[in-house]
Image (tube, grey):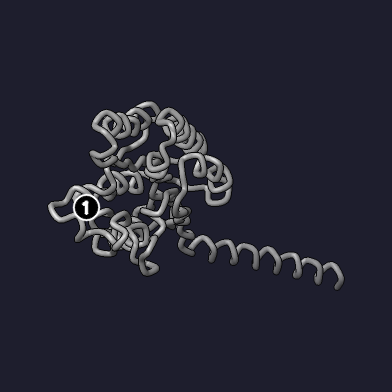
Amino acid sequence: MIGSDMLLRSWGRRHFIAAFLAGAAGLPAMAAPAPAVLVLGDSLSAEYGLRRGTGWVALLELKLAAEGLPARVVNASISGDTTSGGRSRLPALLSQHQPAVVVLELGGNDALRGLPLEMTQRNLEAMAKAARESGARVLLVGMQMPPNYGADYATRFASLYQQVAKAQQAALVPFLLKGVADAPDPLHWFQQDRIHPNERAQRRMLENVWPELKKLVAAVQPARKPKP
């Protein structure tokens, strides 16, 4: 009797395990998590003076979903931040969020504060390199200075983004405020301080970023198994 009971229990366990495995095999595989897109920027990306959820970064997450490119957008932008500040914050952000794409939108405040262009370039290169070494793809979002800064300075400032992008194999958006700061009526696109873009400018800013960013996010989408 004892031997029979043990045999039955052993058979029952094997039968249960086999049935469980067979059922589990029929379940759909769990979807891979959406890749993270980390945006490291200044007030232009931090919704300065705007209602929450109306900035170009917030609109980006909605557009990605609408285009069938799900992603978790992490906005780590801080108003007033410089490339030095971004460089000091980036390692912890990479460790915490493990982004597949890193968007660097910094440098404007460096110029406004008269910081050396060489320092700005070194910081941007260091950030792009750190992001690439973490396994992320990098999008560098550039700025341009108005003519009152001098033609030579404005040219050198704009070109440093091109140099960093080339050296670090990063995608490049030359000017985030294209069609905003250089529009026929720029005041139409700015807040009363005449420095920060208003809500109506945010979609135009997203349009400037979208072509390059779309390609990067599409490239890091998890592979989808074909339906049987």
115 above or below 74? above
Viewer-closest of 112 and 42: 112
Viewer-closest of 85 and 131: 85
Residue under the image location 58 percent in, 61 percent down: 21
10 Å neighbourhood of mark 1: few (<14), some, or many (≥20)? many
The answer to whether residue 228 shows anywhere in this view is: no
Give the image location of residue 130, x and y in percent. 51, 35
Give the image location of residue 214, x and y in percent. 30, 49
Give the image location of residue 60, x and y in percent. 33, 58
Viewer-closest of 94 and 150: 150
Viewer-closest of 34 and 113: 113
Dividing the picture into quarters, in which one does residue 49 lie?
bottom left
- List the residue tagged with mark 1: 180
Instruction: Say left or right for 19 vs 81.
Output: right
118 above or below 203? above
| Residue that protrudes farthest toward the right in the picture | 2
Identity, as a three-letter code, of the amino acid under mark 1:
Val
Q: Quadrant of the C terminus?
A: bottom left
Give the image location of residue 124, x and y in percent. 44, 35
Dividing the picture into quarters, in which one does residue 117 lie?
top left
Q: Quadrant of the N terminus?
A: bottom right
Residue under the image location 38 percent in, 61 percent down: 47
66 above or below 164? below
